[in-house]
Image (cartoon, rainbow, N blue to C red):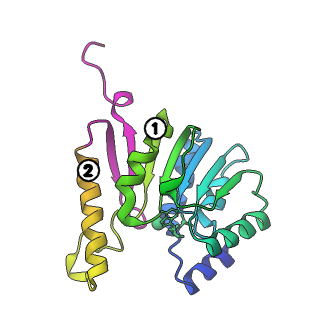
């Protein structure tokens, strides 16, 4: 895995930070997560890490970039988890799935979080969870003084809009965990709020 981490750093591939990666793996173990959908494979780092938590974990992961897809396939094979991971080389916007998942991990284009959340929430088990990475965007969301480019400003605005969307969401209750680049954990409200009549 260190090789993949090094390759990612050298080639500026934004793989998940170690701290949040470990948090996510622990979450998968503690909550007995079995079926995962990941949006944004990159070169397979997070998928391999999640698959390594248990042989019972199965992952469907989507990557639109051909070269990254190829690298992901090769990395997944060399880590002997190819029987647990299916990689789809497509734009996630165009992927239609019938399966349901215990966990949906959104880690693709930062401006498309809301779109992917709404698109794939129907593929979530009733007691499932949607986890989104990079809610802090390297601290730029909390500290606008760090914003240097128009593109960064654009992404920060979209992440802020996504946070508002989560905060006002009637269907899902979101908790923000400040590990790594901050992750959002969203669960259906009806499973988490006590009913008045009960
Ligand atoms: N989850 C990975 C990192 C993903 S980086 C890890 O932690 O190891 C984000 C990836 O999402 C990039 O490789 C990018 O090509 C991909 N991506 C961006 N938009 C996408 C889309 N619309 N559909 C599929 N993949 C997309
Ligand atoms: Mg990420």
Instruction: Give yes or no for residue 193 being in the magenta stretch.
Output: yes
- Residue 84, horizontal then vertical, whole percent: 72, 51
- Residue 166, horizontal then vertical, whole percent: 29, 48
* Residue closest to the far front: 94
Q: Visible in this render: residue 141?
A: no
Q: Visible in this render: residue 55?
A: yes
Instruction: Give yes or no for residue 24 being in the magenta stretch.
Output: no
Kind of element beneath mark 1: helix
Query: In the figure, 186 relative to 108: above or below?
Result: above
Along the viewing direction, whichever of 90 and 4 lies nearer the viewer: 90
Quadrant position of the N terminus in the picture: bottom right
Query: In the figure, 124 relative to 18: above or below?
Result: above
Crowding near pointer 1: few (<14 within 10 Å), some, many (20+)?
Answer: some
Q: Which residue is mark 2?
A: 165
- Residue 7, horizontal then vertical, whole percent: 63, 81
Where does the magenta region start and end? 169-197
Q: Which residue is mark 1?
A: 122
Along the viewing direction, whichever of 191 and 63 lies nearer the viewer: 63
Residue visible at 33% across and 67% down? Answer: 136
- Quadrant of the rendered structure where residue 38 is? bottom right
In primary-sequence order, the first of circles 1 and 2 is: 1
- Residue 120, horizontal then vertical, whole percent: 46, 45
Residue visible at 53% across and 61% down? Answer: 91
- Report the number of numbered marks: 2
């Amino acid at each position: 895995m260190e090789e993949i981490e090094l390759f990612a750093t050298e080639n500026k591939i934004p793989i998940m930070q170690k701290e949040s990666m470990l948090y996510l793996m622990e979450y998968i173990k503690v909550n007995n997560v079995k079926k995962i959908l990941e949006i944004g494979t990159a070169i397979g780092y997070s998928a391999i890490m999640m698959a390594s938590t248990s042989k019972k974990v199965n992952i469907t992961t989507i990557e639109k970039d051909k070269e990254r897809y190829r690298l992901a396939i090769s990395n997944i094979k060399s880590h002997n988890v190819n029987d647990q991971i299916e990689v789809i080389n497509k734009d996630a916007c165009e992927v239609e799935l019938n399966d349901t998942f215990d966990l949906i991990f959104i880690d693709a284009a930062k401006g498309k979080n809301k779109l992917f959340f709404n698109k794939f929430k129907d593929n979530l088990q009733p007691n499932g969870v949607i986890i989104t990475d990079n809610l802090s965007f390297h601290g730029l969301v909390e500290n606008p003084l760090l914003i240097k480019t128009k593109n960064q400003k654009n992404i920060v605005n979209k992440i802020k809009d996504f946070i508002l969307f989560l905060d006002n969401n009637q269907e899902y209750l979101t908790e923000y965990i400040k590990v790594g680049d901050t992750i959002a954990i969203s669960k259906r409200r009806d499973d988490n709020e006590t009913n008045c009549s009960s």
